[in-house]
Image: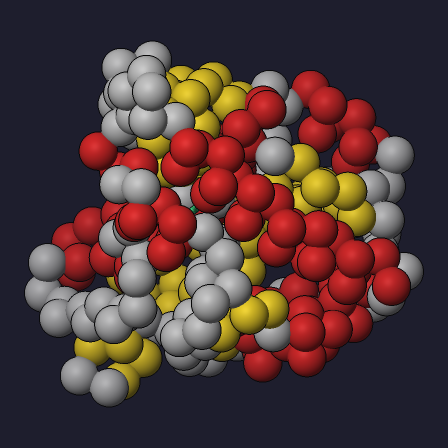
Amino acid sequence: MSDRIILKLGGSVITDKGADCRVNHAALSGIAADIAVVPATGIVVVHGAGSCGHPEARKYRLDQGVAAGQTEGIAVTHRAVSALNAEVVAALRSAGVQALGVHPLHAGVADKGRLVAFESRHLEKMLALGMVPVIHGDVVMDLSRGACIVSGDQLVRYLAVALKCNRVGLATDVPGVLDGGRVVPEITPQTMYTLQIGNSSYTDVTGGMKGKIDELLGLAAAGTGSDIFEVSRLGDFLAGKDHGGTKVRGG
Ligand code: IP8
């Protein structure tokens, strides 16, 4: 069976998190070049928002839900992440990857901040045609709260199961999960509570590294492990080689 891969690009990799929505074009073209040389296989790209979405989501307090008459933040935040998505798709397409943007606002429904439905039949069809769907953390309508933010990591967990992906990789701006400055080679539910994991100092409405690991441990419990590595090691991950980062496993 050939691999089906979900690759998450961290927001801090593809944007400058300290600036107002500044896209890191150099990082994107390096990533696109790495993906372009992967032999034909199924790849789904999911990316975070970085400075193109988190500041907007924080400003409009989308983590607290949305009431009628206060819906401006939905449009503003979705516009910011959609613009970033267009840049990611453009970089991939210039490298020859048949990338296509897919917006969770249009495909998913949440309840109390968690996805309860996400159409995946169109994604299957794109994969069957050799395309690379490019999905992103987004605002999603929420049955209880009006709207909420669904992180790229939550999407990874949901879609890895729905699309039966056998490899899950998260490219970050650090060499893996760090504990006291050292890369933790493996995390399981048992070892998680022994770790001191730092968090980003930048605006992040979806829980930073801790939120990421919670999602990945949930995915591992459902039977799919994942790998967190520095984006400079993306080629190694895609080639199935050691990437020097952290493996999240079910224990
Ligand atoms: O950067 C957040 O996704 P993440 C999405 O993967 C928005 O946490 C809109 C802030």
User: Residue 180: which quarter of the image?
Assistant: bottom left
Which residue appears at 74% of the width and 73% of the height?
29
- Residue 114 in the image, given as x and y percentages of width and height: 33, 27
In screen coordinates, is 198 left or right of 25?
left
Visible residue check, residue 156:
no
The structure's colour scheme is secondary structure
In screen coordinates, is 224 left or right of 86?
left
Which residue appears at 68% of the width and 79% of the height?
26
- Residue 182 in the image, given as x and y percentages of width and height: 27, 85
User: Residue 240: which quarter of the image?
Assistant: bottom right
| Above or below, comparing residue 8 to residue 183 in the picture | above
Which residue appears at 42% of the width and 32% of the height?
72
Residues 57 and 178: in front is 57
In screen coordinates, is 104 left or right of 1?
left
- Residue 130 in the image, given as x and y percentages of width and height: 86, 41
Visible residue check, residue 18:
yes
| Above or below, comparing residue 4 to residue 89 in the picture | above
- Residue 245 in the image, given as x and y percentages of width and height: 43, 74
Which residue appears at 79% of the width and 32% of the height?
126
Q: Quadrant of the N terminus?
A: top right
| Above or below, comparing residue 117 to residue 200 in the picture | above
